[in-house]
Image (cartoon, helix red, strand yellow):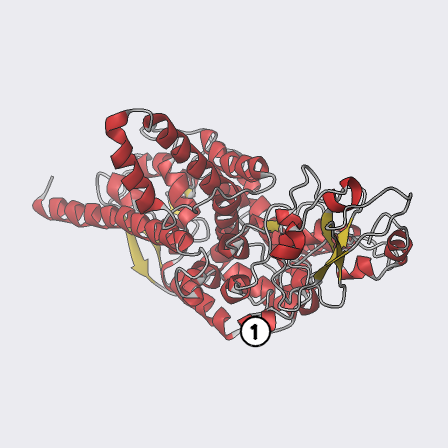
Amino acid sequence: MAPDRVSQKAVHLHWRTARKWVQVLFFGVFILLFIGARRGSWAPWIINLPMRLDPLTMLANTLASRSWLSSSLLALLTLLLTIILGRVWCGWICPLGSLLDLFNFHSGKKRVINPAEGWRLVKYSLLVAVLTAAIFANLSLLVFDPITLLWRSLSASLWPALDTAVSAVEKTLFAIPFLQDPITAFDGGIRPLVFPQTPALYRDGALYALVFFGILGLNVFTPRFWCRYLCPLGAFLGLISKVSIFHRQVNESCKSCGVCAANCPTATIDPNRQFASDPGECIVCMDCIDDCPRQSNTFVAGFGMARWNTYDPSRRQVIGLIGATVVGVALAQSPVDPNHPQPHLIQPPGARENGLLEKCIRCGECSRACPTNAIQPATGEAGLVGLWTPVLITRLGYCDYSCNACGQVCPVQAIPPLSLADKRTEILGVAVIDQNRCIAWAQHKPCIVCEEMCPVPEKAITLEKPPSSDGSPIPDRLRVPRVLTDQCIGCGICEYRCPVGGEAAIRIYSVKWHGSLEAKELLDTPETT
């Protein structure tokens, strides 16, 4: 090989190695931000940086909420980078893309059987559906955005599972006497820095894990299957990359050996077009430069629109997709019956009045920030339109009276950034006591846990001497709890701390349900107050 070719090869190897280090760097930063997202660890504007750099979530939020946030301007940096360099976000920065490269089950294989090119239309179809639904104030399809998907998977499934695994190993090794001191020191170093002091509990963790590992598992069929055929953010950046300034080009030294086409992770190099590639599908991985024995692949500057391919959406297809999405959005709307609202749809402070469903991008940052794990992704409480929006499950946790982290960390202000003083006055729901389950009411045994735990200064739960309904003697010192509805903020600590097994004897109900006809009929009965 000629000396100039050798030096060229060294330079190109340097750039591909640089890409791998950049991937490690950005993935490490993403994990650090995730770890720092626990209440009060880092400044909110730093923690939610990955979400605000995501142009798809920011655009969809703007369309759905009919409002513009100044923080959304950061997404323009990603768009500018794409206009200059192409889909470099996908190949160098995206943390999910980096994981897909790490779990590449085809490493070392020279040839991979690729699905039909028409499959690439799926991600463009999903992109059209996401943006069309957003116009109609529906952001439920943002569950497919790669940044929100990864953060949500980590928060509600993978990180708690890792915490459980670490705890199990510590418990096993702690039985060995000479390891007890090192394990104690190790545990003290990672809690609460990396893992919480008490295990975080999330509903349906297996579901989030199934989605995540399903995406990784698709790599078994084709490298970066998700990026090629499914990712709506990749489709968005791919369309912009059609006009990118720098793009791949094959020079006259090419001898059609086919190595670049065989090893391209997105299979965008076409031997039938003199090994040209589609800038909308190229993730600027530099593998073709490294693999080419003649250095025939280069990235050059130029202006113009790349050719439209058969898998790119046509005008007729876009119109059809818009129509199908409109029908889907209409069908997904849950019927609203003012007399029968959802009894346990409790949303974070200020979110109910703030148009949560029209603003929430389903990122799960509020769940991660919540110190008590009360905020959970919704499954059925809010219907299809509210899928994976935040709800409070007050049997698993409570809204801490001294915390306003969820509103501070929300990247799109779906949960308003209330001051702590204002947050404490927000009415989340109303506590209702089931006297048939309450220890004091039903068993005539002392229990004042709910009254003791109530954080409201004036106490929303009072204790009083119970009436004797059947003439049986009642201990003189026995007191039973009653809820002062006008003072209750629905924080849920009473339900969380209730010592009754299974369903608590005191539960938090939504404000709408508490004012409904159904609630009035129930609360008029002597068994419940």
Who's the residue at 35% across and 36% down the image?
Answer: 263
| Residue 381 seen anywhere in this rendered image of the structure | no
Q: Which residue is mark 1?
A: 421
**Which residue sits at x=78%, y=52%?**
343
Q: Nearer the viewer, residue 241 or 497?
A: 497
Q: Position of residue 265 (x, y in %)?
A: 39, 39
Q: Is residue 289 left or right of residue 118?
A: left
Disc 1 crowd rating (10 Å Cα; few below 14, some 14-19, many 20+) is: few
Extreme residue toward the left, this view: 3
Image quarter of the N terminus: top left
Looking at the picture, how far across and down is residue 151, in whole percent?
48, 50
Is residue 346 at all visible to an observer of this figure? yes
Q: Position of residue 183 (x, y in %)?
A: 29, 35
Circle count: 1
Q: Residue 41 appears at what percent x and percent y?
A: 40, 59
Residue type at the position of mark 1? Ala
In this picture, residue 131 sits left or right of residue 56: right
Q: Is residue 118 left or right of residue 104?
A: right
Instruction: Please state which of residues 279 and 89 is positioned toward the viewer in this rendering.
Output: 89
Which secondary structure, mark 1?
Answer: helix
- Residue 21 sits above or below residue 55 on the image: above
Q: In this orientation, which residue lies closer to the viewer: 182 or 441?
A: 441
Q: Quadrant of residue 65?
A: bottom right
Q: Quadrant of the C terminus?
A: bottom right
Figure quadrant of residue 122:
top right
Q: Residue at x 52, y 55 (%)?
A: 370
